[in-house]
Amino acid sequence: MKCVLIGPDEATRAGLKDGDHVVVQSDYGRLEGVVRIDAALPPGVLNVPHGFDDSFNVNQLTSTQDCDPFTGMAWMSGFPVSIRPAWQINTARANARTDNALDMAAY
């Protein structure tokens, strides 16, 4: 399962529960996943596990233009992100559509 791990205090502050669908966004990209509460994570931290396909990968949140100055590698951890319930993002998107919007699904 494509999970976003978040500590209980951060989940409460963001209004999230275990199993909620969320959007994680950085300055460079975004991904959607499912919340899993992990009491081992410290406040202010979330974790996107590595190793999934292209639609759910921490690389979606990084950039080759913003790199560690010592190694030249893209930041893979320790960079700022926001997390929101997916329904907030999807509702805002739906409200912004015009009358001639066409609903489509990609497979």
Image: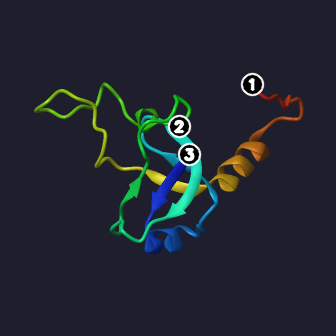
**Numbered tag placed on residue 24 in the rendering:** none
Figure colour scheme? rainbow
Q: How far from the left and from the top, in percent, is residue 65?
A: 30, 26
Q: Earlier in the sequence, mark 2 or mark 1?
A: 2
Q: Amino acid at mark 1?
A: Tyr
Q: Residue at x 54, y 41 (%)?
A: 31
Q: Nearer the viewer, residue 64 or 19?
A: 19
Q: Secondary structure at mark 1?
A: loop
Q: Nearer the viewer, residue 104 or 107?
A: 107
Q: Amino acid at mark 2?
A: Phe
Q: Quadrant of the C terminus?
A: top right
* Label 1 environment density (alpha carbons within 10 Å; few <14, some 14–19, many ≥20): few
Q: Amino acid at mark 3?
A: Lys
Q: Which residue is mark 2?
A: 56
The answer for how far apart the CA atoms under marks 3 and 2 are is 7 Å
- Label 3 with label 1: CB-CB less than 8 Å: no
Q: Residue at x 33, y 68 (%)?
A: 42
- Label 3 with label 2: CB-CB less than 8 Å: yes
Q: How far from the left and from the top, in percent, is residue 102?
A: 86, 28
Q: Which residue is mark 3?
A: 2
Q: Is residue 41 depicted above or below 83 in this figure? A: below
Q: How far from the left and from the top, in percent, is residue 8?
A: 47, 73
The answer for how far apart the CA atoms under marks 2 and 1 are is 16 Å
Q: Earlier in the sequence, mark 3 or mark 2?
A: 3
Q: How far from the left and from the top, in percent, is residue 50?
A: 41, 40
Q: Nearer the viewer, residue 34 or 45?
A: 34
**Numbered tag placed on residue 107 in the rendering:** 1
The answer for how far apart the CA atoms under marks 3 and 1 are is 18 Å
Q: Residue at x 83, y 35 (%)?
A: 98
Q: As drawn, which residue projects farthest toward the right?
A: 99
Q: Is residue 81 left or right of residue 83?
A: left
* Label 3 environment density (alpha carbons within 10 Å; few <14, some 14–19, many ≥20): some
